[in-house]
Image: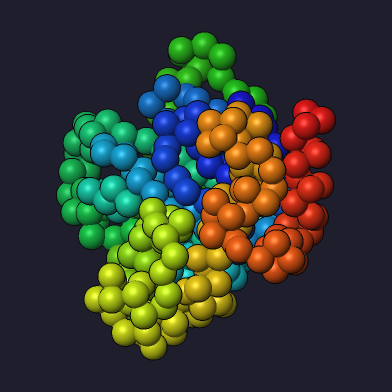
Amino acid sequence: MDSPFHSASELKQLFKLIGKSFDAVQLSQGRLQGRFRVANLGSIVVIELKTNQRLLLNGERGHDCMSFSFEATGLADEHRLFNIPIAPYSLNGFRQGQIEAHFQLSAHTTTYLAVLSTTHFNAFLRHCDSEDLIDHLETNNAIQVSPSVHAQFRQTFEYLLKHQPTTSQQRSQATNHLYRSFLNTISNKVDHKYLAYNPSPRQRLVSEFVTWGFKNAQQDCNLDQISEFLFASRRTLIQGTKESFGMGPMEIMKRVRLEQVNWILRSPNARAEKNLRTITEIAQHYKFQSRGHFAKSYQQVFAESPSETWLKSANQ
């Protein structure tokens, strides 16, 4: 698979094709241009995700699933995992037993992910007499590596996506090579540093808020009501979202609703399913009562008017 995407909701649909249920929202302002490439190696799915805008993804990666992910340059300032900034030159996201997914991607970056079965990888570790490493994979979510090792991973992923294996033997060889590379990395405790998974209470609150926000975006709730639902103070919630996203909780909620509008405008099938026939009906369905305010907010985020998005869907 090699697909461009022009909205966070389109990226959400691409993740669905590989069995991952993530909600997505664009955090920065401007036209989104992204690329989603996948190489299926059988036991491992390798993904390349390029974006020119800052994105937030939230959802569930599923049972019996772990991943090794990294940003290509190793210097992404706004990459975050569960609202914790990632360390330079690090592999992230491998904490076993964790079902939830919550991560941010910096603008103008390329991120690589290897998605694999926890059971299968642990069986490999036992086969290599490295079962003791499982404890590290259950309590940590990142490991900082040397720039040279980071570069080797980048080159390996680039090669696999450019020269995708076509036979079962080639896929098995590629999988074994990646397994061995991951094992060498996580077992090297002299040159590499494990980073404990330890989000603060405020960072956990923000993750809970985002999950709640995607599920309840169409509810007409104010900040006091949201804080009450989350058993948190207004002040703590505001501080947390501003630390993680650079904006307050109500602006995040508006971004989520604008993202939903953007998807409906892009998708004739989604409009038909919800029986929404005009832009005004769509805006009101997602709790935008003022047409002028809605159009201005939409233009600011996506750098085009709602009618321009609608016309693009009609011309596809």
305 and 232: which is toward the camera: 305
Q: Is residue 274 above or below residue 291?
A: above
For the N terminus, the image quarter is top right
Relative side of 109 to 130, left or right = right
Q: Is residue 293 visible?
A: yes
Q: Colour scheme of this structure image? A: rainbow
Residue at 46% in and 40% down: 114
Relative side of 300 to 267, left or right = right
Residue at 66% in and 66% down: 290
For the C terminus, the image quarter is top right
Q: Is residue 88 above or below residue 224?
A: above
- The total number of labels drawn is 0
Residue 108 placement: quadrant: bottom right
Q: Is residue 36 visible?
A: no
Q: Is residue 176 above or below residue 65?
A: above
Q: Position of residue 240 (x, y in %)?
A: 42, 79
215 and 82: which is toward the camera: 215
Residue 295 placement: quadrant: bottom right
In the image, farthest residue toward the bottom: 235
Q: Position of residue 126 (x, y in %)?
A: 19, 36
Q: Position of residue 85 (x, y in %)?
A: 47, 70
Q: Position of residue 142 (x, y in %)?
A: 38, 60
314 and 140: which is toward the camera: 314
Residue at 55% in and 77% down: 247
Residue 194 placement: quadrant: bottom left
Residue at 52% in and 11% down: 167
